[in-house]
Image (cartoon, rainbow, N blue to C red):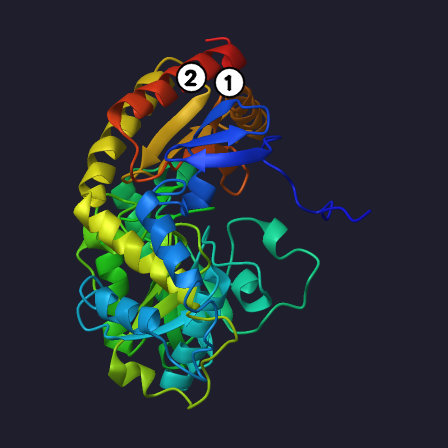
Amino acid sequence: MAQLSPLLKQATPVVVDHGEGVYLYDVEGKRHLDFTAGIGVTSTGHCHPRVVRAAQEQIGKLVHGQYTTVMHKPLLELTERLGAVLPNGLDSVFYANSGSEAVEAALRLSRQATKRPNVIVMQGGFHGRTVAAATMTTSGTRFSAGIGPLMAGVHVTPFPYAYHYGWDEQTATKFALRELDFLFQTVSAPNETAAIFVEPVLGEGGYVPANTEFMAGLRERADRHGILLVVDEIQTGFGRTGKFWGHDHFDVSPDIVLIAKGLASGFPLSGIAASQELMAKALPGSQGGTYGGNAVSCAAAIATLEVIQQENLVENAAERGRQLLEGARVIADKTPAIGEVRGLGLLVGSEFTTADGEPDAATAAAAQQTASKNGLLLLTCGPYMNVVRMVPPLIVNAEQVDEALRIWGDVVASVTGS
């Protein structure tokens, strides 16, 4: 009998029978409030009727039309629809299947377009598990351990993670930008640096938002040195942060944006967007893939965009995100075990620390597991896995947020004794 690989570490013991909206129902009929959303993927909730209908209709017409061989209507329509929401000037799209593939496509484009070998990534960033993407990932050694030697040409600069450094945000930001300038002088000369990759909110790194001063500093340095600014919106895009794009909070314009996760409500679809001018600087034939731009995934993505826009889910993410963040902070105020609660929109993280301020992964894990037993599905993240994250679907309502906070409050009290 075949079994799943033992290397797949399950966050919960739940075996799902079906999902509906914000809830998952296991094979025993128990209902679970899903504040994982497939790690930010099921943006419109589980099995949104419009997304399901679009996928069902497309399956009866065309499942796979390999898009360097033939094109199909969902592919062309999705591209046109994305044109209305992509950042200004980014009018050319390449599709793939996973976030890692999007990252590697952006890396390839950056190096070919600039003819420079190096890229800079953020300390605590996550970009994927394939070799190049794992090399660019510093949110935890578990993503790159044992597969070396890793890819050359990747250099790491600090992110303004103020709580980690024990500083205020302004001090952390000035430090991060000063260290980036130092990196240019000591490790990767600007004229050998193709791109800077940054997440608007560190995802696996602990749900740490960037800020306007930091992002403006990256943009200014990229412009000054002819470096591309690549914004990884794989987890933060499509309304997750309470604005359509995470970088919209910081008034910055990317040269390349990476998309995936919430794009197609659970169907595998990712991509990169750049200007036609930039795309044209890469080598012909350097983009492709067997399953990229799958017809069913594209149909689901079109429906997802319609639902996000017509059901005002970006605005809902902003409102419910404030409610969730404020509620989680009230709970944290009652216990010294949670050192900080932070987030942006429907990305909220609670960082657990010991009495002397050290990362407390054990209590974070106990809280996450206890929440699961009590019907609230959550995940941990952060370099030390001491952050419990809440990432519900964008359709979550006020009553469901209150329900999650009630469970979470009881869980925190029970595992911390506070």
Who comes first in sequence, dot 2 or dot 1?
1
Q: Quadrant of residue 260?
A: bottom left
Q: Are dots 2 and 1 in contact, CB under 8 Å?
A: yes
Q: Tell me the residue at 35%/61% (across/down).
A: 299
**Which image quarter is the C terminus in?**
top left
Could you say whether the residue bearing mark 2 is in a helix, strand or loop?
helix
Few, some or many residues within 10 Å of mark 2 (<14, 14–19, 20+): some
Q: Tell me the residue at 43%/50% (across/down).
A: 266
Left of 13 or right of it: where is 340? left
What amino acid type is highlighted by mark number 2? Ile
In the displayed structure, 226 sits above or below 352; it is below
- Mark sitting on residue 374: 1
| Closer-to-camera residue (37/369) | 37
Q: Quadrant of residue 248?
A: bottom left
Q: Where is residue 250? Give x, y as percent.
A: 20, 53
Left of 403 or right of it: where is 337? right
Q: Which residue is situated farthest in the front direction here?
A: 60
What amino acid type is highlighted by mark number 1? Asn
Q: Is residue 199 visible?
A: no
Few, some or many residues within 10 Å of mark 1 (<14, 14–19, 20+): some
Left of 358 or right of it: where is 40? left
Q: Tell me the residue at 55%/68% (across/down).
A: 132
Q: Where is residue 409? Give x, y as percent.
A: 40, 15
The residue indicated by pointer 2 is 407
| Closer-to-camera residue (90/24) | 24
Q: Is residue 266 visible?
A: yes
Left of 358 or right of it: where is 71? left
Q: Where is residue 25? Give x, y as percent.
A: 50, 29
Q: Where is residue 152? Give x, y as percent.
A: 57, 73
Could you say whether the residue bearing mark 1 is in a helix, strand or loop?
loop
In the displayed structure, 213 sits above or below 328; it is below
